[in-house]
Image (cartoon, helix red, strand yellow):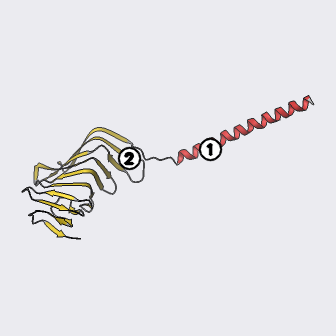
């Protein structure tokens, strides 16, 4: 009887060690599978105190400064993020010494789509001195269109003001713009009223 007990203990120990082996093996396989499906949405490049200059035929068209810029390139829709704010100066060849500016607390640029968004106390000043304030704005570079559905507050160079309660659509050089459900004290030939 003592002999059979020893055998049964050995068999139990053998079965127990086999079970542990299979559990560990199956865990390793699960981890391998899981690693293949893990998110790749993390920055491939990080630039602190970034300054970016964009040129066209030698002419500086844009200067951008941000505390931190992150580039996400390991995903299908590549984008660049300025999560701590951005300050952009954009230049017109006709007025190279008087840049327009865009400031925002957050910005995201979709590289392939050529689509930009800025959020959080967005402030735009054009080369001609017009000042726009809103909470978010979107720029479709391919269509050369800027738009927002937020309330837009505009101050013209002559001091007149305008409020677009339901947003605006504009050409990206601000040569033309349309305000939706607008009101205010304004005097500008370029504004097309569109009350919707």
Q: Which residue, as the protein is rendered here, is positioned at the far right?
A: 1
Q: Is residue 60 above or below residue 158?
A: above
**Label 2 residue SS:** strand
Residue at image x 39%, y 47%? 73
33 displayed left or right of 125: right
Q: Report how far apart the C-alphas of labels 2 and 1 lie in the structure.
A: 29 Å
Q: Residue 57: image x %, image y %? A: 18, 51
**Label 1 residue SS:** helix
Number of on-image labels: 2
Q: Residue 49: image x %, image y %? A: 27, 37
Q: Residue 128: image x %, image y %? A: 10, 55
The residue indicated by pointer 1 is 29
Closer to the camera in the image, 137 or 45: 137
Q: What is the crowding at mark 2: few (fewer than 14 residues within 10 Å), some, or many (at least 20)?
A: many
171 displayed left or right of 41: left
Residue at image x 13%, y 63%? 184
Q: Residue 85: image x %, image y %? A: 27, 45
The residue indicated by pointer 2 is 72
User: Which quadrant of the view contains residue 178?
Assistant: bottom left
Q: Earlier in the sequence, mark 2 or mark 1?
A: 1
Q: What is the crowding at mark 1: few (fewer than 14 residues within 10 Å), some, or many (at least 20)?
A: few
Viewport quadrant of the C terminus: bottom left
Cβ atoms at labels 2 and 1 below 8 Å apart: no
Q: Which residue, as the protein is rendered here, is positioned at the far top?
A: 2
Viewport quadrant of the N terminus: top right
Residue at image x 8%, y 55%? 157
The image's mark for residue 132 is none
């Amino acid at each position: 009887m003592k002999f059979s007990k020893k055998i049964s203990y050995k068999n139990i120990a053998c079965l127990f060690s086999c079970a542990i082996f299979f559990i560990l093996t199956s865990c390793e396989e699960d981890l391998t599978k899981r690693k293949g499906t893990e998110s790749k949405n993390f920055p491939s490049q990080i630039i602190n105190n970034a300054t970016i200059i964009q040129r066209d035929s030698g002419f500086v068209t844009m200067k951008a400064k941000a505390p931190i810029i992150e580039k996400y390139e390991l995903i299908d829709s590549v984008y660049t993020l300025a999560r701590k704010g951005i300050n952009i100066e954009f230049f017109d060849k006709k007025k190279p010494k008087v840049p327009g500016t865009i400031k925002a607390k957050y910005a995201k640029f979709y590289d392939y789509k050529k689509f930009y968004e800025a959020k959080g106390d967005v402030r735009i000043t054009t080369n001609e001195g017009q000042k726009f304030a809103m909470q978010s704005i979107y720029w479709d570079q391919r269509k050369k269109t800027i738009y927002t559905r937020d309330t837009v507050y505009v101050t013209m160079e002559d001091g007149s003001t305008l409020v677009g309660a339901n947003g605006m659509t504009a050409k990206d050089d601000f040569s033309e713009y349309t305000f939706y459900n607008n009101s205010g004290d304004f005097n500008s030939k370029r504004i097309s009223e569109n009350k919707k």
